């Protein structure tokens, strides 16, 4: 456990250092790459920490903070991979500190283990695709926020250095829809496996999660269809991306927050 704690602290420190370097050297490509190396170290050490905990508990821990830490790790890892061929490194300003914070909370409140080894492969598929879908759509939501700020800055007054460092609006918008498309694929698999393999939605407190996730799926899918048929873009895309993500956030973490931290179930 001591080794796991040391690795977690390393991850937290490198996450925060990476975010600080991105902020300080937002327009210096060489230093920005150095900050991304730190982001990689943070994400990989975070992954190693979760792997150690998995081994110690003989499964994944799915309490509120551990799930948040797992999702944050996947988001940080997906962002790091995306930076290899997409100009999305500025998202690290938000994602890396959030990952550090969730990992710190997981360290402090790691208890009430509910491990994935208690589930069959069908439910394991449902849970893991749900987490991946949420992670991808989380990045899409952050991309939408950056796109909104960039659009506002370019219209109203000379943009700040941070905004100038971002790719052109058209590229940012294209990246947003790429992330949405990939996220919806995993969300579709998650919903399909949920409907097929969950036996009693009411007994497992999953009705509202299913309804909210389905509403989010309808919004995201409708946005992609509207993009293809009617050319939806700009603030329309940003607004519906954020609405869909808020629904998904309530679906994934709203129930765990109420049941575990308020009702203590």
Image (tube, rainbow, N blue to C red):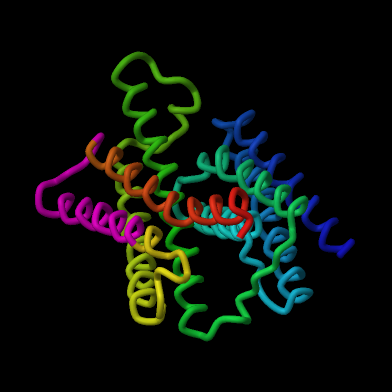
Residue 191 is situated, as x and y percent measured from the top left of the image, at 35, 70
Q: Is residue 197 above or below residue 209?
A: below
Q: Position of residue 115 (x, y in %)?
A: 65, 74
Left or right for 198, reference 170: right
Identify the residue shown where x is 76% and y is 53%.
107
Q: Nearer the viewer, residue 191 or 36?
A: 191
Residue 166 vertical placement versus 140 (above, below): above
State the residue lying farthest toward the top.
157
The answer to which quarter of the image holds residue 73 is bottom right
**Picture quarter with the C terminus:** bottom right
Whether the magenta-drawn stretch holds residue 227 is answered as yes
The one of 148 and 36 positioned closer to us in this rendering: 148
Q: What segment is highlighted magenta in the picture?
A: 211-235
Q: Position of residue 86 (x, y in %)?
A: 44, 51
Position of residue 227 measured from the top left corner of the image (x, y, whole percent) = 18, 50
Residue drawn at the location 67% of the way across and 34% of the way down: 20
107 relative position to 241: left or right:
right
Residues 51 and 29: in front is: 51
Q: Is residue 121 above or below residue 135?
A: below
Residue at the spot 73% in from the left edge and 66% down from the top edge: 48
């Amino acid at each position: 456990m001591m080794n796991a704690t040391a690795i977690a602290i390393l991850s937290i420190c490198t996450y925060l250092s990476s975010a600080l370097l991105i902020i300080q050297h937002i327009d210096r490509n060489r230093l920005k790459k150095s900050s991304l190396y730190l982001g990689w170290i943070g994400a990989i050490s975070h992954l190693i920490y979760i792997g150690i905990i998995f081994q110690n508990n003989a499964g994944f821990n799915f309490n509120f903070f551990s799930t948040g830490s797992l999702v944050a790790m996947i988001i940080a890892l997906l962002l790091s991979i995306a930076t290899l061929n997409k100009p999305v490194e500025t998202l690290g300003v938000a994602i890396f500190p959030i990952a550090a914070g969730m990992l710190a909370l997981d360290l402090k409140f790691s208890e009430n283990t509910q491990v994935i080894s208690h589930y069959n492969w069908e439910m394991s598929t449902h849970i893991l695709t749900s987490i991946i879908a949420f992670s991808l759509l989380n990045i899409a939501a952050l991309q939408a926020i950056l796109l909104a700020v960039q659009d506002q800055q370019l219209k109203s007054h000379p943009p700040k250095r941070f905004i100038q460092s971002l790719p052109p609006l058209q590229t940012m918008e294209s990246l947003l829809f790429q992330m949405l498309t990939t996220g919806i694929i995993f969300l579709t698999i998650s919903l399909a496996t949920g409907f097929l393999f969950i036996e009693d939605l009411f007994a497992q407190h999953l009705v509202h999660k299913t309804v909210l996730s389905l509403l989010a799926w309808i919004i995201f899918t409708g946005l992609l269809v509207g993009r293809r048929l009617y050319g939806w873009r700009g603030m329309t895309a940003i607004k519906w991306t954020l609405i869909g993500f808020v629904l998904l956030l309530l679906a994934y973490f709203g129930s765990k927050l109420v049941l575990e931290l308020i009702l203590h179930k």
